Image (spheres, rainbow, N blue to C red):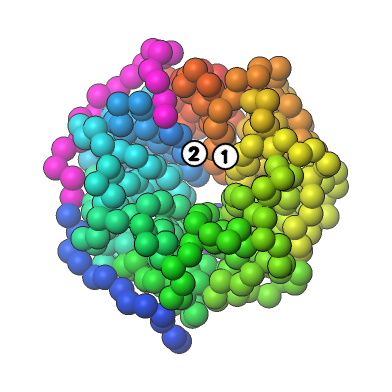
Amino acid sequence: MSRLRRFVIAASASLTVVTGFTLAVAPVSSATTSGRQAGGSTGHVWARISAGRQHTCGIRSDHTLWCWGWNDDGQLGLGDTTDRHTPTEVGTDTDWTTIKAGGYHTCGIRGDQTLWCWGYNGEGELGIGRYGGVWDTPTRVGTNSEWATVSTGDAHTCGIRADHTLWCWGHNLEGELGVGDQDNRVSPTRVGTDTDWATVSAGALHTCGTRVDDTLWCWGWNAQGELGTGDTGKRVNPTQVGTDTDWATVSAGGYHTCGSRTDHTLWCWGFNQEGELGVGDTTDRHTPTQVGTDTDWATVSAGGYHTCGTRTDHTLWCWGWNYYGELGVGHIWGRLTPTQVGADTNWATISTGVVHTCGTRTGHTLWCWGWNDNGQLGIGDTRTRFTPKRV
């Protein structure tokens, strides 16, 4: 059974023209993996954080890269397949700028705008020109040095280059690459010919992105309405969501999507069996639906079956499934509407995995909570936490 199929089953989801060109190149591996570990609350300054399925990666202020958690497929990039329960340095490079942890793989961008991926490659999600294998150290994707951003889904990856072109690769059975068909790609493949992509977010089996004119576009799997197009039919090309031109951010989760607008309102749509849309019930939505009436949302992150967001006053709010304490509210009962996590007013960023969550505070400290069977919380053990625990 494939790794992707296991995720689909766990979610209880019922589940040939190529535009542009592909780059097939031999992979180039990073030469070193330091394995230096950090234990406990060491006062390190964290700049970026990304929670994946059962692993987590982060970048510190000195641009070093650290990963921890599940490592069966080399997704930590440490040169082996051994789990880590505390942050462990990936190589010795000090030029990492962007990191995204996916289902069973991880990708990151360096200061020279080169793109690197590692982990499982059964669907071509590493973009290194071939299928299969476990790549347990960072491996360069192509020869381009113009990558601006990257986003990892469960088994596919998308990125935007400096010229605002969009490229996707990996699993494509549901059209989540947006390249007009349902064939997998093993190298970055250009999505259309447009040169105005601003952001991209890869979910489990769908993808969404915004353009420089603040329009919103989604494509891929749509059985629960996660594309926001008003129906449940999949799309193999980017399809505009409504006609609004005020979308600021978008986050594609397991089978739901959330986004914020320029007026700081929050909107969610798609699968809602666990209340992950935050609209007060468990009914799916096929078009963007406003979450409450507040106009102070700053960031949002859609996870597997839960969602978290920060407000302009730096408070943190989570909702949806909570069986493993991933909401951080001190117990395992789910929430159908946004619920404040503690009383702190110093949250800066948030990243939701499938069933764990991590965030940074304004002082650049790192905190994680939720499921911890593989050490993905980075706190030195494998015990689940129901409230934020400092890493």
Residue wearing tag 1: 352
Q: Is residue 109 left or right of residue 34?
A: right
Q: Which residues are magenta?
A: 29-47
Residue wearing tag 2: 51
| Closer to the camera in the image, 259 or 85 | 259
| Closer to the camera in the image, 385 or 89 | 89
Total marks drawn? 2
Q: Look at 68% across and 75% down and name the residue there.
A: 233
Q: Which amino acid is tagged 2? A: Ala
Task: Looking at this view, name the residue that lies furthest to the bottom.
Answer: 16
Above-or-below relation of 387 to 268: above
Please tell me whether residue 30 belongs to the stretch shown in magenta.
yes
Q: Which secondary structure class fits the magenta region best?
A: loop
Mark 1 / mark 2, whichever is N-terminal? 2
Q: Is residue 194 left or right of residue 296?
A: left
Q: Are marks 1 and 2 in contact (CB under 8 Å)?
A: yes
